[in-house]
């Protein structure tokens, strides 16, 4: 979609512009949006006296150039002679005003302190490896490492409040190339990774909606936040509790938030459960929560450490311990902590798989992380590959966890095939068909199909049609959100099953056949399809 409307005068100007004929035809056919996107994509990468960025267009047998000197103000762009300048002239300067404003806006982070605290971070190095594959600077070793990135940001910061353009001009070299083919391949790979999920939700009927599961329960709720001391962290652990004011059923649910998130994003889930009698605890993971992200961008703390793969599940167990010992005050007197249901989203969902007994390993990371062309590679691999040094020490099974609902977990590299064979808890895995951070194909459908084929266990898989990585959570105001009925049905089923909730080849299903659907993001149980037609591993 074009960034601005393309009127007749602009079209005529493009026809008269001094662009390569093939480039002019492509610009007209795409309404300029393609070139705008390419320009912005190239502008997101490195440079020192970096004079220009080149975007090869192999299908058109030409290239598109961006001269950084043209981006200081609209008047220089109008008088320039690069391809971008010609395109700007053809749009009467409209494009130039937008680009100049974008690249000259101060960056919203303390760049010097940020890079100084981030040097050597496995998470940052993984991200830079991906960037280096798409954007290559002549004269700069590939892949770009965090030491070089820190030097670039420090040079840019010497100008005061650095802009994107300052950063571009701070990288050694005279020319940089955006590998458009690699970018296109990555986009095409993501489409393929979502294709099987899209097919399944079209082929299988969606779950019906039962108001008894969808509606809030009859009980009023109350919230509290307390801190406890834990031996493995220097700072206190904060735990949010959500519970009914009266009529608590004595059953405990724990929820783990994702990377750079917080308990507030899941208080809607907790509210829905508490209104039906459950007590819910949500720890705030201090090494990877929202406040850590803010302090990281301010240069006060480094990115999350691989050690957090070990520490986060320990936070969940510590919350259960505190409830059992009475360290957390004002919890229901009848609360039991020997049978617990766990829930989580993204990294929080991975925490729950660890507590459920899935055994992490770095074997697949060693094999697959260096391969940028692997058909299963997705954005979540940036996080998973950063766990290389801690995965083999991250087993954290907690036998008190009897069943877990995991939404968009990162799984494909962290858990070997067959790791579900010795799990202590049943799993309901939920994935959105439009999740581009943790796509359903490689991170949900393939792993669960392999487990169903190899070990069984009574685990189940639900797809949310139109669900993304972020729209299945729910704040307090949103109540249960799109997954309210599903999480209540799963929790009811897990506690009702008692000892039969344990995974096994003949384990009865915990999720009822129907009634847990949603009108906004229709939900589809694809478990049977995965068992009868296992999806072949493309990894």
Image: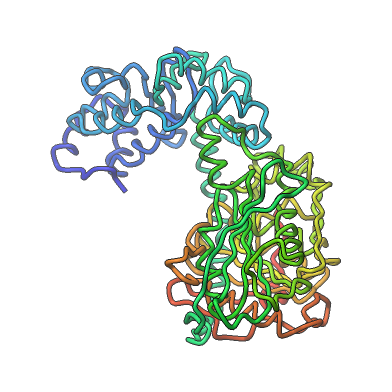
Q: Position of residue 512 (x, y in %)?
A: 63, 85
Please tell me in which quadrant of the rendered image residue 321 appears: bottom right
* The residue positioned farthest toward the left in the image shown: 9
Percent position (x, y) of residue 485? 54, 78
Image position of 262 with respect to 64: above or below: below
Count numbered badges in the picture: 0
**Residue under the point 65% across and 42% down:** 373
Residue 61: percent from the left, percent from the top?
Answer: 43, 31
In terms of depth relative to the viewer, which is nearer, 427 or 182?
Answer: 427
What colour scheme does the image use? rainbow
Left or right: where 396 falls relative to 114: right
Q: Is residue 539 left or right of residue 22?
A: right
Question: Residue 377 or 493: which is nearer the viewer?
Answer: 493
Which quadrant of the view contains residue 299?
A: top right
Left or right of 206 in this view: 532: right
**Front-lying residue, 535 or 100:** 100
Vertical placement of residue 64 versus 229, above or below: above
The correct choice, above or below, for 142 with respect to 181 in the image is above
| Residue depicted at 22% across the width and 17% down the height | 79
At 29% from the left and 27% from the top, the residue drawn is 100
Residue 466 horizontal side relative to residue 16, left or right: right
Q: Please provide percent x and percent y for residue 283.
A: 63, 57
């Amino acid at each position: 979609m074009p960034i601005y409307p393309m009127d007749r005068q602009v079209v005529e100007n493009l026809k008269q512009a001094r662009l390569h004929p093939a480039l002019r035809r492509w610009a007209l056919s795409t309404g300029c949006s393609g070139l705008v996107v390419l320009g912005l994509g190239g502008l997101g990468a490195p440079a020192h006296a970096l004079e220009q960025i080149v975007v090869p267009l192999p299908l058109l047998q030409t290239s598109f150039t961006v001269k950084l000197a043209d981006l200081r103000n609209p008047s220089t762009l109008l008088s320039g002679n690069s391809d971008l300048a010609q395109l700007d002239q053809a749009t009467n300067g409209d494009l130039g005003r937008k680009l100049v404003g974008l690249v000259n806006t101060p960056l919203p982070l303390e760049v010097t302190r940020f890079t100084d605290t981030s040097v050597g971070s496995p998470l940052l190095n993984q991200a830079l490896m991906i960037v280096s594959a798409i954007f290559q600077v002549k004269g700069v070793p590939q892949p770009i490492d965090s030491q070089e990135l820190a030097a670039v940001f420090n040079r840019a910061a010497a100008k005061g409040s650095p802009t994107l353009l300052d950063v571009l001009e701070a990288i050694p070299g005279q020319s940089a190339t955006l590998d458009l083919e690699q970018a296109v391949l990555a986009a095409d790979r993501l489409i393929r990774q979502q294709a099987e999920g899209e097919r399944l939700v079209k082929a299988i009927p969606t779950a019906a909606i039962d108001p008894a599961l969808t509606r809030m329960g009859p009980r009023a709720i109350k919230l509290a936040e307390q801190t406890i001391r834990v031996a493995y962290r220097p700072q206190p652990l904060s735990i949010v509790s959500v519970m009914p004011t009266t009529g608590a059923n004595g059953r405990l649910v724990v929820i783990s938030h994702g990377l750079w998130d917080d308990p507030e994003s899941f208080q809607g889930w907790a509210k829905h459960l508490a209104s039906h009698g459950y007590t819910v605890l949500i720890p705030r993971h201090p090494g990877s929560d929202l406040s850590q992200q803010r302090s990281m961008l301010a240069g006060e703390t480094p990115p999350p450490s691989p050690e957090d793969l070990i520490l986060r599940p320990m936070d969940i167990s510590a919350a259960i311990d505190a409830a059992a010992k009475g360290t957390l005050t004002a919890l229901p007197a009848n609360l039991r902590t020997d049978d617990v249901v766990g829930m989580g989203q993204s990294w929080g969902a991975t925490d729950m798989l660890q507590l459920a007994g899935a055994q992490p390993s770095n074997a697949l990371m060693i094999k697959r992380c260096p391969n940028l062309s692997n058909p299963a590679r997705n954005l979540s691999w940036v996080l998973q590959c950063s766990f290389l040094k801690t995965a083999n020490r991250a087993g954290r099974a907690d036998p008190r966890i009897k069943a877990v609902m995991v939404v968009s977990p990162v799984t494909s590299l962290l858990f070997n095939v067959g790791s579900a064979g010795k799990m202590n808890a049943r799993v309901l895995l939920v994935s959105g068909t439009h999740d581009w951070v943790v796509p359903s194909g490689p991170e949900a459908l393939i792993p669960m199909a392999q487990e169903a084929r190899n070990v069984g266990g009574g685990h189940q898989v639900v797809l949310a049609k139109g669900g993304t990585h972020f729209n299945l959570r729910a704040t307090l105001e949103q109540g249960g959100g799109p997954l309210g009925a599903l999480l209540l049905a799963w929790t009811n089923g897990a506690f009702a099953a008692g000892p039969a909730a344990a995974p096994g080849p003949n384990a009865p299903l915990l999720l009822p056949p129907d009634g847990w659907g949603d009108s906004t993001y229709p939900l589809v149980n694809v478990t049977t399809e995965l068992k009868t037609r296992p999806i072949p591993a493309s990894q």
